[in-house]
Image (cartoon, helix red, strand yellow):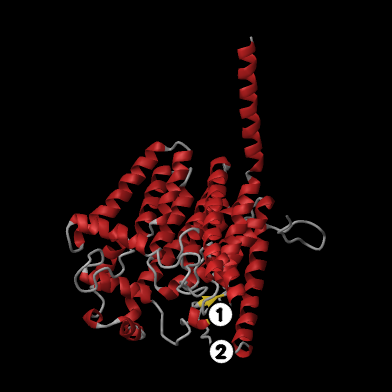
């Protein structure tokens, strides 16, 4: 499979050049597609914001930051009763604790506003200064760590002293970083801690495990990366990271309302309930109905097939077809999980193991916003630093996935579905297939050793 670029003289270009080419051409295509959709697609009106405006003109800038802070003010996120009970219940306690701190700098009027009023009130620069400060500090730390990592690990650094700055700037200006900034999501804390996990793994495993624990306390799904420590038999860092993660889960609950049992089970219920509202295809659903904007779920591939058959406006008559598509989606999700587990078990490469886990935690939940794709940025930089030509296909795919916007047109703005709700899961699934293909030599070697052991046992039995 030739997913690579080359020079006119036939020589292979560096992975970094490939990265910049895909990044630049990808953005140019986005601009062209955006202008086309804006002026020539009937019934579509887009604002030039990367997350658009949900098709209804409602301001959505930085809303996650202020909604979490408001929920933290009340402290009832994990309770069933009370003011704003259950609000932001899918956020971990550590995020709500941090939100409670920032809420001290938030106008008290936010407590009395409804959902839409809150968006309008946070529209002024005066109300956003605390978020700008928070984001600036996190981005400064992120760029510093990434710049140092590139400077000490990139083989081409001696040829171009501006290379660390160029790559860091490109990553900070990538689509998912801008999207995360616009949403105002606390995942910024998870991204910097995930970067530290990647940077220190194999160098200082204790710091790496602690960083991963903090990451999992901000976004729950990264807890699955601890399987890498288990596979490499790094039990001490695993235990330390587990202890830090447990403390980061339980201690912040003390700052919230309710009994310990109510808060613990309320948090668990909040996490799982958040992912129940859009399975692949339900009998009574319009195709793409209730899909979260810019969702990257694997089930969206089957939503797209249903959409092509049923059409935009579903009025019944295809319930049997939708039921079949739902079952097929679940079967393929199981197969995808099996592919991921097999690939993970046989790969020895640290970054590929991370890539496999990351693809699964983005693909399998029914709702994963685009800011989850920021986790691919540290892995992309690691691949660029390794500079192995065989990984060029991954550079291309990760750059297309995490750095290039694709939300340039809605299938139907009332159903809140951009073209990338199909493209992103297809890219992620392609990466999973490539990971499996790369693991084939290790799988064959294992099968050969296994057969050899069985034959030796039979021979020993004959003797």
Residue 116 horizontal/vertical position (percent): 34, 84
Q: Quadrant of the C terminus?
A: top right
Q: Which of 459 and 208 is in front in this view?
A: 459
Mark drawn on residue 312 = 1
Asked if 454 appears above or below 400 in the picture, the reply is: above
Return the residue at label 2: 43
Q: Which residue lies furthest to the right in this view?
A: 9
**Mark 2–mark 1 distance (CA, rounded to whole Å):** 13 Å
Residue 264 horizontal/vertical position (percent): 25, 56
Query: At 20% from the left edge and 69% from the top edge, which residue is drawn?
Result: 81
Residue 231 horizontal/vertical position (percent): 48, 39
Q: How crowded is mark 2: few (under 14 residues within 10 Å), some or many (20 or more)?
A: few
Q: Can residue 221 be seen in this view?
A: yes
Q: In which quarter of the image is residue 109?
A: bottom left
Q: Which of marks 2 and 1 is in front?
A: 1
Q: Tell me the element at label 2.
A: loop
The earlier-in-sequence mark between 2 and 1 is 2
Query: At 32% from the left edge and 75% from the top edge, which residue is drawn?
Result: 66
Q: Can residue 161 be seen in this view?
A: no
Query: At 36% from the left edge and 46% from the top edge, which residue is drawn?
Result: 241
Q: Quadrant of residue 18?
A: bottom right
Residue 247 horizontal/vertical position (percent): 27, 50
Query: At 39% from the left edge and 41% from the top edge, which residue is drawn?
Result: 237
Question: Viewed as shown, does residue 163 lie left or right of 47?
Answer: right
């Amino acid at each position: 499979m030739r997913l690579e670029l080359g020079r006119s003289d036939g020589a292979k270009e560096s992975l970094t050049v490939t990265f910049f080419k895909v990044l630049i051409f990808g953005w140019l295509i986005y601009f062209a597609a955006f202008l086309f959709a804006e002026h020539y697609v009937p019934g579509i009106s887009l604002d030039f914001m990367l997350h658009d405006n949900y098709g209804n003109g409602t301001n959505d800038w930085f809303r996650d930051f202020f909604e979490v802070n408001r929920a933290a003010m009340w402290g009832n996120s994990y309770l069933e009763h009370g003011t704003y009970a259950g609000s932001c219940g899918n956020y971990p306690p550590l995020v709500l604790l941090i939100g409670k701190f920032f809420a001290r700098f938030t106008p008290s009027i936010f407590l009395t506003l409804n959902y839409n009023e809150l968006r309008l009130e946070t529209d002024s620069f005066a109300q956003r200064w605390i978020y700008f400060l928070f984001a600036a500090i996190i981005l400064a730390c992120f760029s510093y760590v990434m710049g140092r990592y590139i400077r000490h690990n990139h083989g081409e650094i001696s040829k171009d002293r501006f290379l660390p700055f160029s790559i860091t700037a490109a990553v900070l200006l990538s689509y998912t970083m801008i999207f995360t900034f616009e949403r105002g999501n606390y995942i910024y804390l998870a991204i910097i801690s995930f970067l530290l996990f990647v940077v220190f793994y194999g160098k200082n495993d204790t710091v790496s495990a602690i960083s991963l624990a903090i990451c999992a306390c901000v976004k729950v799904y990264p807890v699955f990366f601890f399987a890498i420590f288990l596979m490499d038999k790094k039990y001490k860092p695993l235990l330390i990271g587990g202890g830090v993660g447990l403390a980061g889960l339980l201690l912040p609950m003390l700052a919230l309302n309710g009994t310990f049992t109510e808060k613990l089970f309320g948090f668990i219920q909040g996490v799982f309930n958040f992912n129940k509202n859009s399975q692949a295809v339900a009998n009574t659903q319009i195709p793409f109905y209730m899909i979260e904007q810019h969702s990257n779920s694997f089930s969206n591939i089957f939503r797209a097939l249903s959409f092509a058959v049923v059409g935009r406006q579903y009025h019944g008559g295809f319930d049997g077809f939708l039921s079949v598509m739902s079952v097929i989606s679940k079967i393929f999700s199981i197969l995808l999980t099996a592919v991921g587990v097999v690939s993970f078990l046989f790969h020895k490469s640290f970054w590929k193991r991370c890539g496999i886990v990351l693809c699964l935690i983005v693909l399998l939940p029914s709702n994963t916003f685009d800011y989850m794709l920021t986790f691919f940025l540290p892995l992309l930089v690691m691949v660029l630093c390794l500079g192995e030509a065989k990984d060029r296909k991954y550079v291309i795919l990760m750059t297309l996935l995490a750095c290039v916007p694709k939300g340039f047109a809605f299938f139907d703005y009332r159903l809140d579905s951009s073209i990338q709700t199909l493209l992103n899961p297809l890219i992620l699934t392609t990466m999973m297939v490539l990971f499996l293909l790369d693991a084939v030599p290790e799988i064959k070697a294992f099968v050969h050793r296994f057969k050899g052991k069985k034959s030796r046992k039979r021979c020993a039995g004959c003797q």
